[in-house]
Image: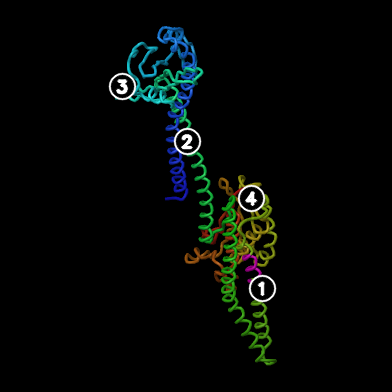
Amino acid sequence: MRIGLRILLGYFLIVAIAALLLGRVFLQEVKPGVRQAMEDTLVDTANLLAEQAADDMLAGHIDDGRFAAHVRALTDRDLGADIWGFRKRRVSTRIYVTDARGIVVFDSDGHDVGKDYSRWNDVYLTLRGRYGARSTQVDPDDEASSVMHVAAPIKHRDGNGERIIGVLTVAKPNQTIAPFIARSQTVILRWGFVLLGVALAIGLLAAWWLSRQLGALRRYADAVTAGERASLPDSAGEFGDLGRALETMRAKLEGKQYVEQYVHALTHELKSPLAAIRGSAELLESAGGAMPEADRARFVATIHAQSERMAEMIDKLLALAAVEHRQRIEQPQRLALRTLADEAAERIAPKCAQKSLRLEIAEDEAARGARVSGDAFLLRQSLLNLLENAADFAPAGSVVELRLRREGDVVVVEVLDRGPGVPDYALERAFERFYSLARPAGGSRSSGLGLCFVAEAAGLHGGSAALDNREGGGAVASLRLPLA
């Protein structure tokens, strides 16, 4: 399972558990919270009415006095209240009064007058000077039928103090607050789902971002492992620090391996010219003045040629090392490819003149004015290397062609000659470092670094290089570069 998916699942699981717990807490607190608020209101109401009923209770007119008349008048009153979107038209409160023995002497509903309520908690506790309240289901099988009863003592005050002469209870069905509870729970659930959705979206975004950062670093590491050119991805925070640490590690490890490889390769390639120089020098030294002038000149020429070969090899090796070690073009420029081709042709002109070669440059209409983005020196040197390679193999008096053509968003540079072509076994190795073929007419091998330089420069510019045999004889080397 990918790490981004793991992070998302873990994050969402935590959010879901937290949302579930918080939702349950909120939902469980809504109902008791509303009931507590209602009970608080009923306490105030019961005590207020108990004070108003005291006079009629003392006079023995609690069931037919002014207090009773006012309470019964409530049943006919149209309240017309709008409570947060809920209409209230009728009084839903029941009021009853018991005497000091717990016998009902007044009931706003007119049902239970004369009944003994002394064992109900609201009456029983209040008559004993304590807070009396209860919640009782009218239907034992229906929880929604519960009614909250809150009582207050009716007191008589005289010179001897005060005494409880009765109990007034205010009763209100819990069902009257059910719509408020249901709406509150609905709002909580709705916003809970909204928050859960927002949390999921944030989780998806965070997981995508983390996966993207890690994926970029992984692709960078894979490219480095495969020996490809790779630029350090743009990363933020700790990922940026990790990327820079990987880049530093890569540079140090590659630098060490690069030096080791070049030391081995250079040592191997220098053995042949050094052996030739040493052999010629020993023969010159041992022969002294007795060596014929023709032999002396031949050995001196060998020493000079091999010295030139070593110098050329070192120069090209340094140039190749500079290209291979670069990961990108730091300051690319828009370059006219035809201009670079003309400059390379100008530099190869003396060599072509020595072999009586004719160099022709052609470009199709689509490639006219084509520009590429990159380093002028690297591209010019690449074209020069291709032209030098073609001039080495082209027969004297033949034509070396340099063609520019366009294929979509790519410009193709082809260098063609009419030489012996490339053996099949050498086609796949032509761009290897130090790999070269013998030149025609007994010419010495090259350093084997020119085509390798071309391939490295092409890759650095986002392009590619190829070598193939030409129809009718000869070879064609191509350089493909993306247009700027």
The magenta region covers: 313-321
Q: Earlier in the sequence, mark 4 or mark 1?
A: 1
Q: Is residue 71 left or right of residue 239?
A: left
The local crowd at label 1, few if under 14, some if 14 to 19, many if 20 or more residues have their Cα within 10 Å, is few
Amino acid carrying mark 1 in the image:
Ala
Distance in Å between CA atoms under marks 1 and 3: 110 Å
> Which numbered dot is residue 483?
none
Q: Nearer the viewer, mark 2 or mark 3?
A: 3
Q: Nearer the viewer, mark 1 or mark 2?
A: 2
Residue 348 occupies which quadrant of the picture? bottom right
Q: Position of residue 4 (x, y in %)?
A: 47, 48
> Which numbered dot is residue 372?
4
Residue at numbered disc 2: 197
What residue appears at the point 69 percent right and 65 percent down from the top-left corner? 350
Q: Is residue 234 visible?
A: no
Amino acid carrying mark 3 in the image:
Asp
Residue at numbered disc 1: 311
Residue 130 occupies which quadrant of the picture? top left
Q: Earlier in the sequence, mark 3 or mark 4?
A: 3
Q: Earlier in the sequence, mark 2 or mark 3?
A: 3
Amino acid carrying mark 2 in the image:
Gly
Q: Nearer the viewer, residue 34 or 253?
A: 34
Q: Position of residue 223 (x, y in %)?
A: 52, 57
The local crowd at label 2, few if under 14, some if 14 to 19, many if 20 or more residues have their Cα within 10 Å, is few
Q: Earlier in the sequence, mark 1 or mark 3?
A: 3
Residue at numbered disc 3: 139
At numbered mark 2, what does the secondary structure look like: helix, strand or loop?
helix
The local crowd at label 3, few if under 14, some if 14 to 19, many if 20 or more residues have their Cα within 10 Å, is few
What residue appears at the point 62 percent right and 56 percent down from the top-left corner? 328
At numbered mark 1, what does the secondary structure look like: helix, strand or loop?
helix
Vertical side of 401 occupied by 287: above or below: below
